[in-house]
Amino acid sequence: MRTKRERKVSSSQSLEPSYDETILGTWENHHLFSALVELTYRCNLDCYFCYNDLDLAGDPLRLADYERLFEEMRTLGCLHLTLSGGEPLAHPDFFAIGAKARELDFVVRVKTNGHGLDRELAGRLRSEVDPFIVEVSLHGACAETHDRQTRVAGSFDRLVHNLDVMRATGLRVKINTALTRWNEREIEGMFAIADRFAVPLTLDPEVTPRDNGDRDPMRISASPEGLRHLVAVQASRRKGTQAEVLREGDAEIHSRDPDRHCGAGASGIAIDPYGNVYPCVQWRRAIGNVHGSSLQGIWRANGKLDEIRRLTVEAKGVVSGHDSEVPLVGFCPGVAEMLTGDPLAVPESTSTRANVLSELPLHPVQ
Amino acid sequence: MPDLNLVFRRKDDIRYRVVGDEAIVVRQNAAEVLALNDVGARVLELIDADKTLAQVIATMSGEYDVRPDELANDVQRFVAAIRDAGIVVDVSEEVSEKVR
Ligand SMILES: C[S@@+](CC[C@H](N)C(=O)[O-])C[C@H]1O[C@@H](n2cnc3c(N)ncnc32)[C@H](O)[C@@H]1O
Ligand code: SF4
């Protein structure tokens, strides 16, 4: 009797475990494996591009609801639980909710702006929740750019200070940045900040519309030059070619499963503060609400979810049928539905990005 | 091989779930993922700070069609492997370390 296989996280830049086969198995078998829970839309920052729909109304889930929900998730075999928002730490019961997640043995990720994580709260987070990782958002390499996004003066300085505190507390930290027109000239500077704290930085090249369909955030989408620069910086950091960077991104998103584009509704879900359940944080087509029904019921017998699963299979065809010279990197049926009304239509922003990336030279970057 | 009277528990940074016929184990501190087969998954489920290895084996002998000595041998070897991999810890060793 031996361990069947043992895998180490492949890249020192990533704390994300790579266990493709298991993930594929969960997609195929509709095994709920990861959930993102938005605890509240309250926030201590006010980001210009924030996708949250602050007008959404409903009966907020309370501590007892979360306890029941997490028990159900565990029964369904869910391992990964992301606490997001809004600012998750702004929920009055954040620590009790996080402690419950720990008690139930979830691999917890906390997505936070880091603004409130001073020594005391960072210490409590470490001892009471013990998350696998804390993902903090950085919006630029200097106060001027970062604070322009958050619209809170001093937020950059506080984040940099709190990053130091979090590391000293022993929290595992990762930085997430959405590439925008405002920060696209500061990519090296943001990597320098990440390197200073010895934490990984992931840059997302896409600014998405608000969850209510408002496209205003997309006004600060990165320019073609910004996208090219991002790929060049990533390639030089990995000492690879730009083509390799692109192929890797492409493989991550599209190529693993022969039948399905992504795990939306197949192994993952998102739940908003009012109990609405979605196939993914980016696909805001509600498939149920946990106030009136059990999560197990929503997950196991649901025509809306069947439709989502069918669409992710069709989305695979959209990507593979696209012009082979222009790989459709980053196609998301959820964003497509938001922007075009059709989850299988390629939004202009996605094809523009694909065109820009397909024109990149394939030589090694110096 | 660990003694049958020893008591083990999962380390604090271990998180796991049974997925299909295997257990996915995450070692948070090392950012490592391991997959255990179904028998390994069952051992991991049964190990807690209350049960001796002999008790774990006794529970499993009612579940698997294997000769008792073979099962005991397999479980002991498996527990030695997951102890060396930092997944479980011998509770008595923890206590003696604290006393020291
Ligand atoms: C909505 S926030 C919630 C967690 C936390 N408040 C934070 O800011 O990290 C989740 C992530 O989405 C990013 N984000 C917000 N609005 C976005 C948009 N329109 N497009 C792309 N990313 C966005 C944030 O920067 C953050 O990394
Ligand atoms: S910190 Fe997060 S939730 Fe708050 S406004 Fe910014 S993106 Fe939105």
Image (cartoon, coloured by chain):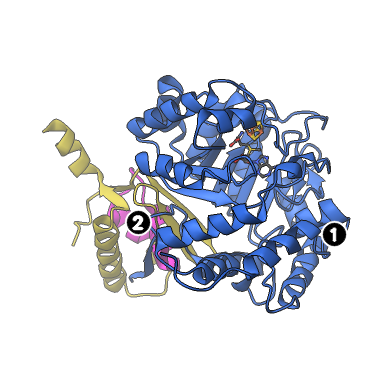
Q: Amino acid at mark 2?
A: Val
Q: Secondary structure at mark 2?
A: helix
> Horizontally, is A341 left or right of A334 in the view?
right
Asked whether A46 or A262 is in front, the reply is: A46
The chain that hosts pointer 2 is: B
Q: Residue at x 30, y 51 (%)?
A: B88
Image location (x, y in percent) of residue A172: 40, 41
- Look at mark 2 in the image and give the residue it sits on: B56
Q: For chain A, what colour was chosen?
A: blue
The chain that hosts pointer 1 is: A
Main SS category, magenta section: helix
Image location (x, y in percent) of residue B35: 43, 64
- Look at mark 1 in the image and give the residue it sits on: A303
Magenta part of the protein: which range?
B34-58
Q: Secondary structure at mark 1?
A: helix
**Between marks 1 and 2, how big is the CA–CA gap?**
43 Å
Q: Quick check: is A18 in the magenta stretch?
A: no
The label number, if any, that marks residue A84 in the structure image: none
Q: Is residue A305 visible?
A: no
Asked whether A1 or A298 is in front, the reply is: A298
Q: Quadrant of residue A137?
A: top right
> Looking at the image, which residue sits at the far left?
B100
Asked whether A183 or B35 is in front, the reply is: A183
Q: Residue at x 50, y 32 (%)?
A: A142
Queried on whether the Cβ of the residue with tag 2 lies below 8 angstroms from ligand 1, the answer reads no
- Local crowd at mark 1 within 10 Å, few (<14), some, or many (≥20)? few
> Horizontally, is A197 left or right of A125 in the view?
left
Q: Amino acid at mark 1?
A: Gly
> Horizontally, is A31 left or right of A311 in the view?
left
Q: Which chain is yellow?
A: B
